[in-house]
Image (cartoon, rainbow, N blue to C red):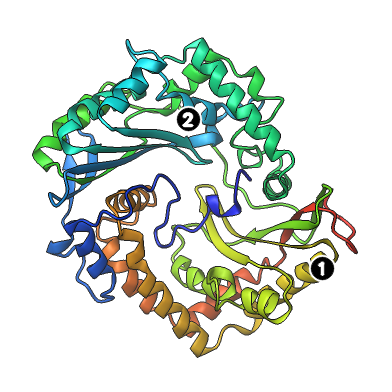
């Protein structure tokens, strides 16, 4: 697992970690979305939501929230594929390629490309996750033409110049060396490796100290050519641009891409090693703990009840069972959490904590027992109502900037939830009953064991998973 366990996580909201900027800029469209989010019974795709499906003359689709309150445009886009498309012997290709897309393109070398961004105060970034290669753009509306032109160059004509490749490669290697002494990173990586042996999800997204030096320019160019295509592209735009203006610009940016991506099939997978504990020994006073097991994929009809169930387990910073039992009652950890992680090819529940080495065994036993207790007995009516109230009331916070709205719209498209999902989401949560939660708990109880990955010097534990 690369980075925090949360990074592959909770999409029920929908929440996508990414590039969130200008959080103080509230637009009229954003405020409208916030008000709708607070009304569980809002009609599907109400007029005031103003999410418009824009289709270019060449057939490229984007979702748009047109807002003229501020002279800003935010765009999020993604190519489905991500690090799961890395060659098996070269993890890190997608991550390195994404870091280089804004390091020179077309006739512009890295310095010239960055100068163009700086001259117009344009923010353009790319990243790679397990299942997608994403791009994020922020610009003043008066600079939308040069901003979109830089997007066009970056996705159609990346240079991957030797100087830029080596410079970014050295930065990646430095980061990997730091992570080699980071208990949290090691616990995450250990969990993925143990859960998904011989599967793309078991390989580090950022690569390894052995693999990154072997990645060539040809590897990067081949990855970009295979993954960046029109048929696996999703786009969301929020801000001061009309549908009529956006439509032809979609073709200008993305129309020259290949019609179809050449993706290597990725099989669905369930985590292995459930019920075991794997330990990476590192001399630190606290042990980092990552745990996880089998849950539901995003398209499962029971996903929303499972989302509510998880909130009661470890989704709330103050009211969850894990928080109360692990932190409040026993003081074993400062933070403990869980979340659903619906990847494209696996449905997971994941969580984590950090505790003193001599309290690790106690913490693990407690997490196991609380999870099993919730699956066996179910929650109380009061717990269920508290969870639903929180999840409904907090949904609006996911729409407090144009950047967040664009990210939400993108993830809704990726998850194929429908353009009216924002109107429907709180009603779906409100409709969850105790019977729904108990039904989901019974399903999860069929595979209740958790895999624990530890990094530290835990006392009183015998690793049994490697």
* Residue ID at (41%, 17%): 110
SS for dot 1? helix
Q: Quadrant of the N terminus?
A: top right
Measuring from the top left, give residue 249's x and y in whole percent.
18, 30
The disc, 1 or 2, on the residue closer to the chain's N-terminal end is 2
* Residue ID at (15%, 34%): 142
229 and 439: which one is in front? 229
Measuring from the top left, give residue 193's x and y in whole percent.
71, 43
Let me know if residue 398 appears in the view.
Answer: yes
Residue sitting at the far bottom: 381
* Residue ID at (27%, 27%): 254
| 61 horizontally vs 295: left or right | left
Measuring from the top left, give residue 286's x and y in whole percent.
77, 58
- Disc 2 target residue: 263
- Disc 1 target residue: 359
SS for dot 2? loop
Q: Nearer the viewer, mark 1 or mark 2?
A: 1
Q: Mark 1 Cα within 10 Å, few/some/many (few <14, many 20+)?
A: some
Using the rendered view, name the quadrant where residue 118 is placed.
top left
* Residue ID at (59%, 37%): 205
Measuring from the top left, give residue 432's x and y in whole percent.
42, 78
């Amino acid at each position: 697992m690369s980075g925090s366990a949360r990074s592959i996580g909770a999409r029920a909201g929908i929440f996508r970690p990414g590039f969130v900027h200008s959080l103080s800029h509230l637009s009229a469209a954003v405020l409208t979305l916030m008000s709708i989010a607070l009304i569980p019974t809002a009609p599907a795709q109400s007029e005031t939501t103003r999410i418009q499906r824009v289709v270019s003359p060449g057939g490229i689709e984007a979702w748009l929230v047109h807002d003229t309150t501020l002279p800003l445009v935010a765009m999020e886009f993604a190519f489905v594929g991500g690090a799961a498309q890395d060659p098996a012997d070269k993890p890190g290709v997608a991550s390195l390629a994404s870091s280089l897309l804004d390091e020179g393109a077309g006739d512009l070398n890295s310095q010239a490309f960055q100068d163009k961004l700086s001259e117009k105060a344009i923010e353009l970034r790319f990243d790679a996750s397990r299942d997608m290669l994403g791009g994020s753009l922020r610009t003043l509306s008066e600079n939308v033409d040069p901003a979109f032109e830089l997007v066009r160059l970056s996705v159609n004509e990346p240079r991957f110049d030797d100087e830029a490749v080596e410079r970014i490669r050295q930065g990646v290697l430095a980061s990997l060396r730091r992570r080699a002494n980071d208990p949290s990173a090691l616990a995450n990586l250990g969990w993925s490796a143990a859960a998904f042996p011989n599967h793309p999800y078991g390989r580090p997204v950022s690569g390894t100290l052995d693999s990154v030096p072997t990645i060539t320019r040809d590897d990067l160019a081949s990855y970009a050519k295979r993954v960046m295509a029109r048929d696996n592209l999703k786009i969301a735009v929020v801000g001061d641009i009309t549908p009529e203006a956006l439509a032809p610009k979609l073709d200008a940016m993305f129309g020259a891409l290949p019609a179809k991506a050449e993706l290597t099939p990725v099989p669905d997978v369930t985590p292995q090693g459930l019920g075991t504990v794997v330990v990476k020994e590192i001399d630190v006073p606290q042990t980092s703990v990552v745990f996880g097991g089998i849950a539901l994929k995003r398209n499962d009809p029971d996903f929303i009840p499972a989302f509510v169930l998880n909130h009661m387990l470890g989704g709330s910073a103050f009211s969850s069972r894990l928080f109360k039992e692990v932190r409040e009652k026993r003081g074993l950890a400062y933070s403990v959490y869980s979340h659903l992680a619906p990847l494209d090819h696996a449905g997971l529940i994941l969580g984590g904590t950090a505790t003193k080495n001599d309290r690790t065994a106690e913490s693990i036993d407690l997490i196991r027992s609380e999870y099993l207790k919730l699956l066996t007995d179910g929650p109380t009516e009061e717990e269920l109502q508290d969870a639903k109230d929180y999840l409904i009331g907090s949904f609006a916070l996911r729409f407090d900037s144009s950047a967040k709205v664009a990210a939400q719209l993108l993830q809704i498209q990726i998850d194929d939830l429908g353009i009216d999902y924002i109107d429907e989401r709180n009603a779906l949560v409100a409709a969850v009953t105790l019977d729904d939660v108990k039904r989901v708990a019974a399903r999860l109880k069929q595979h209740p064991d958790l895999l624990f990955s530890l990094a530290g010097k835990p006392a009183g534990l015998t690793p049994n998973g490697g």
